[in-house]
Image: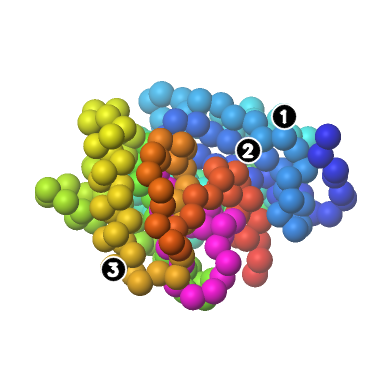
Amino acid sequence: MLEQDRSTRTLAVDIGGSGIKVMVLNEKGEPQTERNRLETPQPPKPEPILEAIASLAGTQGEFDRVSVGFPGVVRLGVIKTAVNLDPSWIDFDLETTLKDRLGKPARVANDADIQGLGAIAGIGVELVVTLGTGFGSALFVDGILVPNLELGHHPFRKGESYEQQLGRFALDTVGSKRWNRRLEKAIVYLQNLFNCDCLYIGGGNTKKIAFELPPKVKIVPNISGLLGGIALWRD
């Protein structure tokens, strides 16, 4: 059983291309409920995903506010890109809609940014990449986020982006062995490009990594994508 307290409780939501996950955190970012998950509805349009979030929220007991990680660029709670979901998300005000739907204050940010906030040490240059349906990224300098990096859509190799070479479709298409070789190259490229003090790798496909990671590269648990949600309320 998780030990619970009566501090302000945050419902953390992680929207992914394959799954939607929720958990309630206390003010310290500590879990107060067990994580719950539903498959991402198909097609992944706003209304069915909002219904899934509301359904999951109903399993988590009481909460005071909501933090959401979304797989795309988010500005002031409004979705600007949604490559791995549905085009109908573009310019959708997710923050206001969730506030109205759940009756609680809500804040929304890029999912890799939130995962990074749950993982980084806050010292020096830290890069976070997530390996899931797509390829997420977040860059921090002394704990401060560099906004809207979207590294996954930058050129990587053979005329394709990091996401095209390392997303789930690529993994399923070329197989684990070739995918791992690509990831090894990507790590070298990213370390040389950013000269980062630490590179964190998260996301569901970290379990497919089959080589020894170099120094200053760490795998972070998927739960970081929820635990980082508390940071959205640190004004």
The total number of labels drawn is 3
Instruction: Determine which residue is flagged by label 3.
Output: 193
Instruction: Determine which residue is flagged by label 2.
Output: 22
Q: Which numbered dot is residue 7?
A: none
Residue 12 x, y percent position in the rendering: 64, 45
Does 130 lie within the magenta span?
A: yes
Of callouts 2 and 3, the N-terminal one = 2
Residue 136 x, y percent position in the rendering: 39, 50
* Mark 1: amino acid: Thr
Of callouts 2 and 1, the N-terminal one = 2
Residue 193 x, y percent position in the rendering: 28, 68
Identified at 24% across, 56% down, the residue is: 154
Mark 3 residue crowding within 10 angstroms, few (<14) / some (14–19) / many (20+): few
Question: Taking 209 as reference, is 185 above or below it?
Answer: below
Contact between labelled residues 1 and 2, with CB atoms less than 8 Å apart: yes
Identified at 33% across, 65% down, the residue is: 191
Question: Taking 146 as reference, is 18 above or below it?
Answer: above
140 lies left or right of 185 = right
Q: Quadrant of residue 50?
A: top right
Mark 1 residue crowding within 10 angstroms, few (<14) / some (14–19) / many (20+): some
* Mark 3: amino acid: Leu
Magenta highlight range: 113-131
Q: Which numbered dot is residue 59?
A: 1
136 lies left or right of 102 = left
SS at circle 1? loop
